[in-house]
Amino acid sequence: MLKLARNALGHLGSIVDCENNIITWKLFSSLNKIQECEGFKLANKFSSRHLQFLKHKMNVQLAAQTLSSSVADAIEFLDKSVKLKEFQNSIGTVKFIRIVDRLFDILNSRNPIAKGFEQPLRHQSRNTWEEILKHSAEYLLSLKTHDSTNQLLVTHQRKTFITGFVTTIKSTIDMTTAMFSDENAFKYQLTYRFSQDQIELLFSYIRAQGGWNNNPNCLQLKYAMSKMLLRNTIIASKNANCLTFSDSTTTIIPFFHSQKHKAHLKETPTDNLDEPESSPEEDLLCSRISTSEFLSNILFYISFQTG
């Protein structure tokens, strides 16, 4: 759904929300342009590769990095703080990104001890997450095309991401309600386990065992499953149509072991401690370098974090 939302916005160029705020793809292009010109990024991973999404339609990671809260923060900062003309009226775009990113986090919770919107769904906090999910569904259903027709996007040919998100929201609420209401109710729900990524990772591994043959027969499927069970691991292909959240592998039966040999940090001798950190020539050169407000804010942020 995240890829379809990104593709719909990139294809249409702009859409309108229920408050008549414009959600435009142009702000993404402006963000990439100013970051390339200044040589720094506003704490996000957005680049020209994300703009050229037609070459990477099935890459979930690029879509997640495009519609992320870090990109929304960067656009809002350039509008509210730096007050750049090309980022004016970014309220609609920032709101759209935040709602989709928040929805993606809630529907992909995978860590029982996570915080924020990535935490699992619990019965104690049901009023909170259920209200967020219902509000997100109402927001998506109210989106319209930015043209003379003002057609509801849910009736447009690019409606797939809206119907997909709304259906997932309703299914998640119904399933968690049933699982929390039983006598032996679950303590929490990890919504990532409801996604189709689990079966896609399995099929991706099976296809990878056949090399160029991605349509295995019964015997090849049997050997691939046996090999997977013996190695106790599934490694997703780089071209798989899903996003793996684990570091490297997804184990069927988890095995935990402690590292016996740990490399000790080597202490490097520090000489010439009495030498000055910088020379007068370097100070004079740095004082003559002119920086823009964009770059000054980034340097201030870096110095504050490392100071």
Image: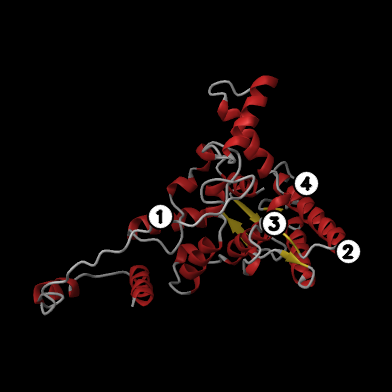
In the rendered image, the vertical position of residue 284 relative to residue 90, given as above or below: below
Which numbered disc flags the more N-terminal residue, 2 or 1?
1
Task: Estimate the spatial distance between the alpha carbons at disc 1 and disc 4, rounded to whole Å.
Answer: 34 Å
Task: Estimate the spatial distance between the alpha carbons at disc 2 and disc 3, rounded to whole Å.
Answer: 20 Å
Kind of element beneath mark 2: helix
- Indicate the amino acid at tag 4: Thr
Quick check: 254 left or right of 238?
right
Which numbered disc flags the more N-terminal residue, 4 or 2?
4
- Indicate the amino acid at tag 1: Lys
Label 2 or label 3, whichever lies nearer to me, is: 2
Which numbered disc flags the more N-terminal residue, 1 or 3?
1
Task: Estimate the spatial distance between the alpha carbons at disc 3 and disc 4, rounded to whole Å.
Answer: 24 Å
Is any part of residue 217 visible from this angle? no
Kind of element beneath mark 1: helix
- Indicate the amino acid at tag 3: Leu
Coordinates of residue 199 in the picture (x, y in percent): 69, 39
Task: Decide which of 262, 189 is in the foreground and name it.
Answer: 262
Circle 3 residue: 107
Res. 155 mark? 4
Mark 4 surroundings: few (<14), some (14-19) or many (≥20) residues within 10 A = few
In the rendered image, the vertical position of residue 211 relative to residue 36, given as above or below: above
Circle 2 residue: 181
Which numbered disc flags the more N-terminal residue, 3 or 4?
3
Circle 1 residue: 33
Q: Residue at x 71, y 58 (%)?
A: 190
Which numbered disc flags the more N-terminal residue, 2 or 3?
3
Label 4 or label 2, whichever lies nearer to me, is: 2
- Indicate the amino acid at tag 2: Ser
Is any part of residue 271 visible from this angle? yes
Coordinates of residue 201 in the picture (x, y in percent): 62, 39
